[in-house]
Amino acid sequence: MASSASATRPKMPTAVIAVDEETYRTEPFRDLPKVMWTKQFGAVLDGVREAGAAVIGFDIILPTSVEPIIRGHDRDFMLALRRAAGDGKILLAKLQHQVKPISPFAGHSFVVGHQRNIRPVNLNEDADGIIRGVPLFFAAENSDGTARKDSSFALELAARAAGEAPRIVGQSGDVLLGGYRVPGGADNALTVNFDGGASIPTFSLADIHACVAAGEQDFLKRHFAGKVVLLGAVLDVEDRKITSKRFITAPEGEIAGARCVLAPPDALYKTATTRDSIPGVYVHAAAVNNLLRGDALRLPARAWNSLIAVAFALMVAGLAMRLPAWRAGLAILGTALIWLIVVTAFFRTSLVLPLFDPLIAGALSFAVLLGYRFAVSDKDRRRLRHAFAFYLAPALVDRMVERGEAPELGGESRELTVLFSDIENFTTVSEHLTPEQLVGGLNIYLSEMTDIIERHGGFVDKYIGDAIVAVFGAPLEDAEHARHAVSAALACNRRLAQMPGVFAGRDDLILNARIGLNSGAMLVGNIGSKRRFNYTVIGDAVNLAARLEGANKAFGSSILVSESTARACGEAIAMRELDLIRVVGREAPLAVHEPLCLAAEADAAVTEKIAAYADALARYRMRDFEAAAAALEAMGTHDAAALNLAARARAMIAAPPPADWRGINELLQK
């Protein structure tokens, strides 16, 4: 928790006065060496101090001066330094790389009281060359040889702004600034929270100098009162650092603050150019912000990072061993996305959780276990799948592999729908083709029809030459197997109409399929010998579907369904009852229906067609053959079923049926 004084501090407690390109191009700085800018520095220092700045830090080192050559040149600057030092509001920088540091000019150092107001600006550079933090203290030596610890540039600026000296707590080594326990204090490394993109208000030194000269004290108070003001270089080549902010830097010039006197320069910055480095002064400014606001990044101990990575790897291992590989992969990707969200959420509270370590551990775990499954644990499953995939239903194979058991002979009685499909006049078609052309075209046809059947939830029981036998409702239960079967039949006929020339490009060989469907109780299961068997269906209901496929010949129709199938479809399919028939091998008559389309696709013409045929069929069964024939013939020459029934009605006029006639159409052929 931060000190009570922090409650009165601005949300952005720092501001930067930049020695930038504008400064080098503006009088009185233009064409003047920086070592001779001391008069201007002094004026700015006095103006900002008088405006109420909490403390002013010079992140610019002037190790030399023209004072020994031009006596009195630095007088104004040294007087300004002396006044600021007397108020405890100035901090100069030094840089410690070799045995002897790069320090301010001796005269400047003298007037600020030497080490009392000079601090190192060194930064912590990680092994990958990235700067992620700043030191809190530096080891130093007094003139008498005794050791001491100097606070870093950023820590000293924050301490003076807070009005409290930093303390090192006991043996833990933690650092306290007021009531704020600084993260990383025990390791002497503050991890900087750069607070997103460019956010620190920046003012050109040239404009602030002109502002002071113009006496615009109100402007200076508005922007600097109570703040830590850092003066540093913001240039293309000088003092630039690659930091953990390298992916969220802003174009140069976007961080400019308000203007006081000078107009903004034109075409000074390329606003479309974004660099991965930032001026070093912003690193110190961000660190000061963190210390004053109490939002420096907190890094968990390495043990916690390792524990998180191990936990993530174990979770991935569980998913990889329990789920199919593709599902496990999706689950792991989803988990990685959730982890990214969690890390981002915690980062907003300044807690840095490991992002890549758990993901890398999970990826390695997944890869190793996937290899183990392929080489060892899934070997038997693949053997079962390969052994039975070509003659058992895919759903049955999946269930068998999941249970890890081989199929056995046996079956059960189930309510299912069976579909029989056959190509009309296939013998005639085959006479015009070579064996290669016939097989190639047949394979295309069967593949297309099989895909449609499987998309509608069925499975192909067997192929018998050009014929297809398909089952709906097994092995996986489907309460709407009848509707799905009829929908598949309609889709098969639509697709077939789009496939002219499937046999060797012969457009003259037109394919038409006849399909019969029936729903009812039938035996389904693994049927055959102990060495070879198929998952198939048998029973009277299956035979009836085969008879209905052949019954299409008598009506000139493409699809016929039984009364039980039509009843199970309900109103989902637009269909009409064609006739009452008795097929070969069955005594009981049954009503047959012709599906026309899905109910959702039925238009006024389809509705009218169904109603007209139903009215004509009713007249036919009431022995009003003349009216029935006329109504049926009026339906048009393209309706083969209507013309077929009209012809039978005309025959009844010529040879009236007996008194016990019940309108049953006796089909003498299979």
Image (tube, rainbow, N blue to C red):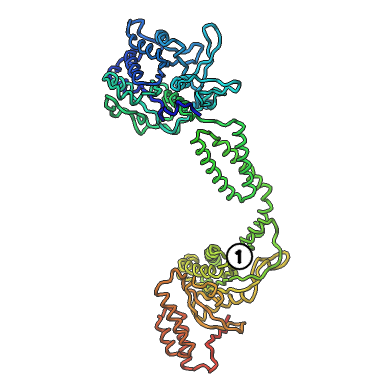
Q: Is residue 489 left or right of 537 when viewed as pictured?
A: left
Which residue ends up furthest to the front in the rendered image?
A: 4
> Image point 41% across, 87% down: which residue?
630
Q: Residues within 10 Å of mark 1 (few under 14, many from 20)?
A: few
**Going by the image, does 59 lie left or right of 659?**
left
Residue 100: x, y in percent?
49, 11
Label 1 amino acid? Glu
Q: Secondary structure at mark 1?
A: loop
Provide residue 91's location: percent of width, then percent of height: 42, 16
The x and y percentages for residue 155 are: 48, 21
Question: Which picture quadrant has residue 46?
Answer: top left
Indicate whether 435 appears above or below 160: below
Q: Determine which quarter of the picture holds residue 21.
A: top left
- Residue 436 visible in the shown view: no
Let me know if residue 270 appears in the view.
yes
From the viewer's perspective, tell me whether residue 563 is left or right of residue 607: right
Residue extending furthest toward the right: 530
Q: Which residue is mark 1?
A: 477
Front residue of 408/391: it is 408
**Quarter of the figure that contains the C terminus:** bottom right
> Percent x, y for residue 590?
56, 81
Report the number of numbered marks: 1
Using the image, determine if residue 156 lies above or below residue 329. above
From this view, report whether residue 584 is shown above or below residue 192.
Answer: below
Return the residue nearer the eye: 508 or 122: 122
Q: Is residue 381 left or right of residue 594?
A: right
